[in-house]
Amino acid sequence: MYKKTVEIKNTLGIHARPASEIVKRASKFKSNISIEKDGMEVNAKSIMGILMLACEQGSKITIVADGEDEKEAVESIVELVDNKFYEE
Amino acid sequence: MKNRVFRGIPASSGIVMGKAYVLSREIFVPSLARKTTEEELATFYSAIKSTQRDLEGIIQRLKEQKSHEGLKLIEVQLLLLKDPFFVETVENYIREGEGASYAIHKFIETLKTEFETIGDPYIKDRFLDIKDVARRVMRKIEGETGELSYQEPHVLFAHDLTPSDTAQLDKEYVLGFVTETGGKMSHTAIIARALGIPAVVGVGGILKEVKNGEQVIIDGFRGVVVVAPDEDTKRTYEKRIREYREYEKKLEKAKELPATTIDGKEIDLTANIEIPLELKPAVENGARGIGLYRTEFIFLTDDGLPDEETQFRYYREAAEMFRDLPVIFRTLDSGGDKILGWQYLKEDNPFLGWRGIRLTLDRKEIFLSQVRAILKASSYGNVKIMLPMVSSLEEVERARELLEEAINGLEKEGRHIKKPVEMGIMVEIPSAAILSEHFAKHVDFFSIGTNDLTQYTLAVDRTNERISYLFDHVNPAVVRLMRQTIDAAHENGIWAGVCGEIASDPVAIPLLIGLNVDELSLTPALIPQIKGIIRGISYQECVKIAQEVLKMDSARKVRKFLSQELLSRFPHLENLLVEVDND
């Protein structure tokens, strides 16, 4: 298992487009990937799940992956979040 | 029980009589029946597949119609349909012993509670998309088609129409709408007006009162719905419908004719556009261009600010449709809360706050990307730029600098721009009207926004019911500001138009002509009616009417005088006046 915590930096937080970007990335990996925020855990391959976390700007999320490509999976999503989903 | 009458909000004008078609999905009760777990799972999977085919079919159709907005909505639904959270949750409920249909119902209910705790209204709204998809799947299982489909034309009754419903409405089969929720500016109301379908919204509880196939009358002028009308009522309405049709026919004949007064003064009649769906009705109703293209709809998305390319596609579509006729794009006119998210929500006086040009000059990347997209569209037609909420000359100067910056940037990239691209302003803040002689030296045209000008001049919030009696755009104070603005424009060799609701208020038309207005921009569906008035009056008479009005001291006197003047010339308008006032 591999995990990392990141802060959401983009102004709008995780809205529909960023959420679908996460799903697209997560779906490329074989590992089980989940995202945790304030004690709630959702599947990173689910838009609905990610939206329900209601991640605003400044909130912290933990990305957890378990499987053969766990490290790459987590780093790939962290990279997306750090770059504000390439939208600002 | 005979002749049940219900009242709601008149959302789109016209009267129709027909059979009711009730979309009862809000009171839909999922069946509790259950076969084996395997059979229920199989039912669920095949319903998903069949929903997927429906959505792909809609996508295909929307692509053919080039409806970008609709397309985006349905594509999101397709993603949601395959969402593991949805599929796995429903699978689990089925394994726990529920029937497929009830499992989906349970999923929606659980999700509803989860989403209720979320503060962000934009994310909250995504719940509606999820519900829309889940219900499509549920309707497959229950044996309904899931699509709006009819054998013959009907009046549609619904709790609310979802965006995907409105994206697939077929005008030939929908005579009119009645919804339980919504207001004048709701999505449903805008679509109804765009399609020219009569609609009454906000009729609470109506779904329980009307049955499929029952005869109904809807009066979109007065906001009245009559269920199972008796013979007398039917006769009255049949007469009104006949009269209205004859009137429309007369207007139809004038479609190709110019909006010219008896003594030869021509007024440019152009259209106000809120969504691209209105472009075609604008052409069909004989608009001589777009006098006000509101761009807010492009920005009201939930996935951040729209990129330049997306904007360009919309602007180009409009420019191409009107070719040589002008298309005036108003730059983004909204408060920060609408486009930048809920964290900008709190302002004590949003109407006096950070909005319109104030916001876009502060966040100049928004202004630049919009202006660049408009400039790119310039080679496809005759585009112009209009700035909203201008209150000082510095704003015009700053906008001009950014416009130059955008032009230079695009030319360096080797883009062709048809120059000069004209830039005008909305005159809607009293300071701009009072100083119009100075503004006129720095811009290419004025368009008077009477809704805000009235609101700011009279200090009357037009959404506040308690003081709505004070709001009247023919108030002499507003009329004087209009006159001052139009005169200043002409003295400086530029034109002045009007794009507020006053331009579709029949009684005000002679006054506006008498004030020498050059252009009137209004809702596409009302263009023929206003043209009928212009073609039936002389400019000389209008000048006299305007002179009389300028002597008056109260809005009430002005309105009474204007109504008398209009009715003495157009007695047949009496039936329509009340209604248009509401509009």
Image (spheres, coloured by chain):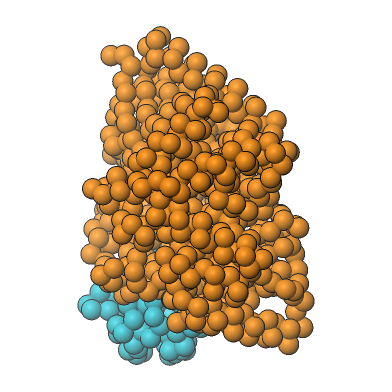
Residue B45 in sight from this viewpoint: no
Quadrant in the rendering for residue A47: bottom left
Residue B539 in sight from this viewpoint: yes
Which residue does the image show at 66% across and 66% down from the upper left?
B493
- Indicate the position of residue B389 as horizontal and vertical percent values: 45, 68
Quadrant in the rendering for residue B248: top right
| Whether residue B2 is situated above or below residue B58 in the rendered picture | above
| Whether residue B566 is situated above or below residue B437 in the rendered picture | above
Viewport quadrant of the N terminus of chain A: bottom left
Which residue does the image show at 49% across and 53% down from the upper left?
B500
| Whether residue B568 is situated above or below residue B233 in the rendered picture | below
Residue positioned most to the top: B231
- Indicate the position of residue B121 as horizontal and vertical percent values: 32, 64
- Indicate the position of residue A34 as horizontal and vertical percent values: 35, 77
Q: Is residue B59 left or right of residue B454?
A: right
Q: Which chain is orange?
A: B
Which residue does the image show at 63% across and 68% down from the upper left?
B492
For chain A, give the colour: cyan
Which residue does the image show at 55% across and 81% down from the upper left?
B397
Nearer the observer, B474 or A45: B474
Q: Is residue B76 left or right of residue B7?
A: right
Nearer the observer, B11 or B50: B11
- Indicate the position of residue B499 as horizontal and vertical percent values: 53, 54
The mark tally for this picture is 0
